[in-house]
Image (cartoon, rainbow, N blue to C red):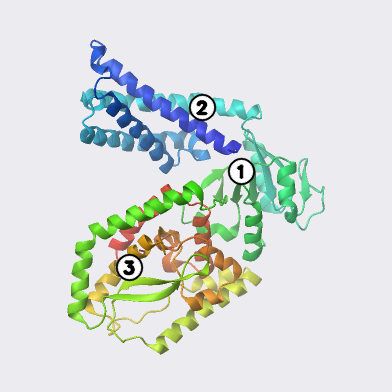
């Protein structure tokens, strides 16, 4: 069942789809006003309807990618105008491309149709979104139909600030109260808003007060406790956001949604099952298969060069830990001379990673360690400069991440996904805390949020948090964005795939 937040966005999307079709009909009528029979649906009618249905769906997808269904996307006039203009230009270009390749009579009859469509679509969308929908949304909120009931977890300064901001600025939201382990029940925190109970009572309070959105606003909380709270909050139909210093790493690396001018991280639980799982698996199979076919000439050349320049197998395989802690064989192109494994270096690497995880345990006990110690340490282990064991072709394929391409076979097999947390080694997994292991609730990926944004610039805990954010926000569109961001990272030789 859709919650109020989802209903408002679906209402907006349906309106957008109708407006796009209205703009198209207007363009046809204007262009062929003297010869309406030219636009009658004839033998190609079914094809024409299908073509424009695809156009409308893709247009909605473009709006989604450009944040036009985020809250600030349809409530801020200035921001919405800019985003609308940008998305409309891209959408019009898409219509032109589809018209060219489809040879549809309804679309390709006249260039003027496309010109009229671009103009009327933008004007109609402005009228619909900025004048009609914005006022309709406010009316429905005032009538309690779309008004969201907000529960704030944490009655400290952050929670109080949130409550004040929502009360002063948001007509479509109502704070019902606070949860806090260190405040007395019924203690007044802001105006007439009081503490409703402890954090452990959150599910009971959500049901009792018909809560639509939970905002976690805690400052002094360990990662373990934060993960427990998140898992408790993530129930069907409840929108969950975080306002916490612990998640600054995400807000500085990704686009987020604003609420009362405050940036919040969406960590609403999304279970990777049903339709979401089927779509993601289908895209993994299609993407990996297409990649293996299209890149087969390159992979063949690399294989030949590896074989000609050094003895040993072309493919290097290693045991890695995947979904739910299950091991699998992980494949890469061999970039080092065969038999050049160095036990001392492997031991050094293991000690290095152990130190990072040990530091993260200290951080869990005392959060301030993050600012003074751990951020100075990088997740990537130190590598030897000009390591003589690396072949000349190995240096090239490492720099461009071409050595990672065989992992497309892992994706096709089902061991990995195109996008997800990177798989870890056995000894790393054995040292993980329970909340670290949450990053492997899904299939590991060839690329992910950390790879395209953080890399060696974040701490171990930051990396886990970014993986956790990805897991709770999985969608085909998010995956597509991360895949597209991977290519420039590869081309500039920073790794990432």
> Residue 72: where, in percent of width, then height?
51, 39
- In percent of the image, x 23 and y 11: which residue is there? 35
Q: Residues within 10 Å of mark 3 (few under 14, many from 20)?
A: some
Q: Residues within 10 Å of mark 2 (few under 14, many from 20)?
A: many
Label 2 to label 3: alpha-carbon separation: 47 Å
Left or right for 8, reference 228: left
Q: Nearer the viewer, residue 254 or 289?
A: 289
> Residue 5: where, in percent of width, then height?
58, 38
Give the mark nearer the N terminus: 2 vs 3: 2
> Residue 82: where, in percent of width, then height?
40, 36
- In percent of the image, x 61 and y 43: which residue is there? 237
Left or right for 66, reference 186: left
Residue extending furthest top?
34
Mark 1, residue position: 237
Give the mark nearer the N terminus: 2 vs 1: 2
Mark 3, residue position: 404
Is the residue 223 above or below the residue 382 in the image? Answer: above
> Residue 398: where, in percent of width, then height?
30, 72
To which quarter of the image does residue 364 belong? bottom right
Residue 133 bears which disc, if any? 2
Q: Nearer the viewer, residue 53 or 214?
A: 53
Q: Secondary structure at mark 1?
A: loop
Q: Secondary structure at mark 3?
A: helix
């Amino acid at each position: 069942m859709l919650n109020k937040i989802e209903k408002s966005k679906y209402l907006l999307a349906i309106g957008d789809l109708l407006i796009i079709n209205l703009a198209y009909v207007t363009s046809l009528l204007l262009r062929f006003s003297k010869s309406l029979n030219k636009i009658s649906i004839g033998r190609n009618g079914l094809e024409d309807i299908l073509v424009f249905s695809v156009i409308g769906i893709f247009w909605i997808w473009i709006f989604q990618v450009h944040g036009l269904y985020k809250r600030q996307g349809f409530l801020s006039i200035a921001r919405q105008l800019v985003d609308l203009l940008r998305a409309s230009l891209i959408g019009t270009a898409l219509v032109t491309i589809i018209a060219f390749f489809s040879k549809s009579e309804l679309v390709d009859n006249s260039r003027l149709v496309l010109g009229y469509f671009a103009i009327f679509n933008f004007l109609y969308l402005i009228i619909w979104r900025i004048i009609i929908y914005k006022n309709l949304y406010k009316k429905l909120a005032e009538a309690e139909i779309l008004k969201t009931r907000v529960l704030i977890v944490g009655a400290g300064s952050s929670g109080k600030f949130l409550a004040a901001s929502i009360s002063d600025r948001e007509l479509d939201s109502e704070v019902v109260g606070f949860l806090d382990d260190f405040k007395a029940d019924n203690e007044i925190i802001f105006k007439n808003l009081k503490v409703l109970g402890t954090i452990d009572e959150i599910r009971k309070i959500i049901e009792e007060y018909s809560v639509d959105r939970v905002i976690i606003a805690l400052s002094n909380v360990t990662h373990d406790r934060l993960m427990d709270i998140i898992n408790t909050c993530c129930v069907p139909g409840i929108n969950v956001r975080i306002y916490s210093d612990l998640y600054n790493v995400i807000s500085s690396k990704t686009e987020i949604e604003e609420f009362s001018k405050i940036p919040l991280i969406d960590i609403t639980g999304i279970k990777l099952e049903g339709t979401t799982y089927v779509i993601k698996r289908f895209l993994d199979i299609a993407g990996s298969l297409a990649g293996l076919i299209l890149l087969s000439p390159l992979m063949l050349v690399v294989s030949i060069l590896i074989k000609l320049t050094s003895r040993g197998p072309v493919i290097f395989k290693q045991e890695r830990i995947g979904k739910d802690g299950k091991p699998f064989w992980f494949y890469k192109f061999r970039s080092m001379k065969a038999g050049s494994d160095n036990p001392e270096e492997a031991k050094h690497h293991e000690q290095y990673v152990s130190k990072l995880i040990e530091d993260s345990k200290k951080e869990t006990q005392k959060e301030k360690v993050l600012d003074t110690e751990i951020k100075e340490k990088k997740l990537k282990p130190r590598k030897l400069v000009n390591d003589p064991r690396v072949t000349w072709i190995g240096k090239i394929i490492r720099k461009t991440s071409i050595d990672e391409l065989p992992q497309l076979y892992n994706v096709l097999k089902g061991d990995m996904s195109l996008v997800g947390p990177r798989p870890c080694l056995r000894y790393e997994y054995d040292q993980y805390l329970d909340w670290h292991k949450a990053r492997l609730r899904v299939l590991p990926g060839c690329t992910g949020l950390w790879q395209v944004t953080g890399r060696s610039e974040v701490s171990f805990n930051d990396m886990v948090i970014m993986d956790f954010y990805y897991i709770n926000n999985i969608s085909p569109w998010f995956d597509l964005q991360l895949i597209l961001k991977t290519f420039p990272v590869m081309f500039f030789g920073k790794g990432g795939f």
